[in-house]
Image (tube, rainbow, N blue to C red):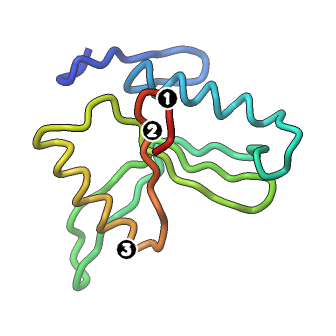
Amino acid sequence: MNKFGAKKVENEYGKFDSIAEYTFFKKLTTLKKAESISDRVVDIERQKVYECIINDKKCFKYKADFNVKYANGVERVFDVKGYTGGASYAVFRVKKKCIEAQYNIKIELVINGKII
């Protein structure tokens, strides 16, 4: 169990930081068989690292829970959260804004299994 009470999951698919993260991963894997091209997942990359660099200085690293590529060419970045309060969530929000601006991406939050 981690400091936020999340139970880690380890299985044939790898290690996951929480049950919620593993559940979302299972949902993504089912989309590999989706009939609609816009829904069909072709690649799931876990724990992709992004570095925030300002004025040629490395400031911090951010690990996205999932980078997902769809059959229609769309790529989406997801971060699974079980708790959206406190100092750690405030730090995440700042990191999220920096990474989104630097890489011109949108990091989508998954809370209670729903993308928000």
The spot of residue 64 in percent (x, y) is 43, 48
- From the viewer's perspective, is 51 left or right of 29? left
Quadrant where the C terminus sits is top left
Task: Specify the amino acid type for callout 1.
Answer: Gly
- From the viewer's perspective, is 101 left or right of 31? left
Q: Which residue is mark 1?
A: 113
Answer few, some or many: residues within 10 Å of disc 3's Cα (few below 14, many 20 plus, some between 14 and 19). few
Task: Specify the amino acid type for callout 2.
Answer: Val
Residue 65 image-quadrant placement:
top left
58 shown above or below 60: below
75 shown above or below 46: below
Task: Specify the amino acid type for callout 3.
Answer: Ala
- Asked whether the beta carbons under mark 2 and mark 1 sit within 8 Å of each other, the answer is yes
The spot of residue 41 in percent (x, y) is 74, 44
Q: Secondary structure at mark 2?
A: strand
Q: Secondary structure at mark 3?
A: helix
State the mark number for residue 110.
Answer: 2
Q: Residue at x 26, y 59 (%)?
A: 95
Q: Which residue is mark 3?
A: 101
Q: Residue at x 38, y 75 (%)?
A: 102
- Asked whether the beta carbons under mark 3 and mark 1 sit within 8 Å of each other, the answer is no
